[in-house]
Image (cartoon, rainbow, N blue to C red):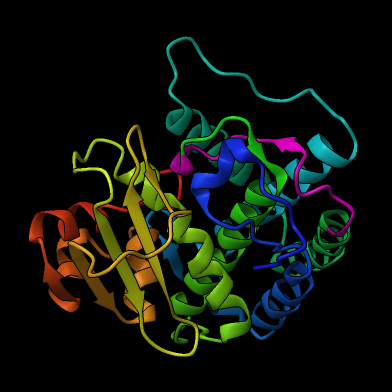
Amino acid sequence: MNPQLTHDPGHAWLGAPIDARPLFVVEQAALMAVLRGLGPSDWSEEAVPGWSVRDLAAHLLGDFYGRLARDRDGHRQGPLFAPGETLETFIHRINQEWVDALARVSPAALTDTLDLVGGQVARFFETTDPDAPSLGVSWAGLDPAPMWLDCARDLTEFWTHRQQIRHAVGQETDLDPRLLSVVLDIFMRALPHTLRHTAAPVGTQIQVSVDGPAGGTWTVTAAGDRWSLAEPRAGQPAARVQMDADSAWRLCTRGITPATALARAHIDGDRQLAEAACQIVSIVY
């Protein structure tokens, strides 16, 4: 977290703002190292259900172009919602349309283009105003969201897709705390929205702890009309969930189910509140 970023009183319940802007250069370099290290057969391995490594790389390029077109260049043309289409359905549809359109692009050409355009994305984010209104972040319950959160959300998406590519070709999760510590901090900003339907007396606290060099502790407090990450810790939390970093990020991206996460975690206190916190989802799902 960067203490120089200001608090918008309307978003205080999200906790202190996160300045993810300098990390896009680091993430971009890590992505290119993975892609340039792939063998010819690696590109056809399944990275996520229905998509190969090549498909997922094409999707990342679509994300890169979309960010530049919309926010850097002010380009407003593009796909529109179909009648009755939900946000999730719309996103999945246009993502698939993009991947299908890029099927003719070779892995080598795709890698070179990702290198070029990804660098432009990293440079663009360095110029943004963290407090400016930006795209909504549905899993945090904000539309519009402040740019710092929208920017941070993109970092988590790029990081997650890189892990999926790594896993597809037999590599382990990259647990480098320079990135993972920030990714986990961003993911946990979904806790207040996750608990929005969970009733508890004002002041009730749930604590989520993640072990290891990239870990941390997040305390969410029932604060009347919502849960908040901005309240100070006050005594013993009503529930405490402790898990390892690999389980935590997989839970937030639905790489594992809440039931699996709970089975791996150490739970103290109110089991029902712990289970509610483990419903966290920090992606459009």
Residue 24 lies left or right of residue 187; in this view the side is right
Depicted 1 relative to depicted 277: above or below:
below
- Asked whether residue 129 is drawn in magenta, I would say yes
Give the quarter of the figure containing the C terminus: top left
Residue 185 lies left or right of residue 258; in this view the side is right
Question: In the image, residue 118 lies at what x, y percent?
Answer: 79, 62
| Residue at the spot 48% in from the left edge and 90% down from the top edge | 213
Question: In the image, residue 106 lies at what x, y percent?
Answer: 72, 62
Depicted 30 relative to depicted 136: above or below:
below
Secondary structure mostly taken by the magenta-highlighted segment of the chain: loop
Residue placed furthest toward the bottom: 213
- Pick the front one: 123 or 58: 123
Question: In the image, residue 32 lies at what x, y percent?
Answer: 73, 76
Depicted 285 relative to depicted 51: above or below:
above
- Pick the front one: 245 or 103: 245
User: Magenta span covers which residues?
Assistant: 126-140
Question: In the image, residue 272 lies at what x, y percent?
Answer: 10, 54
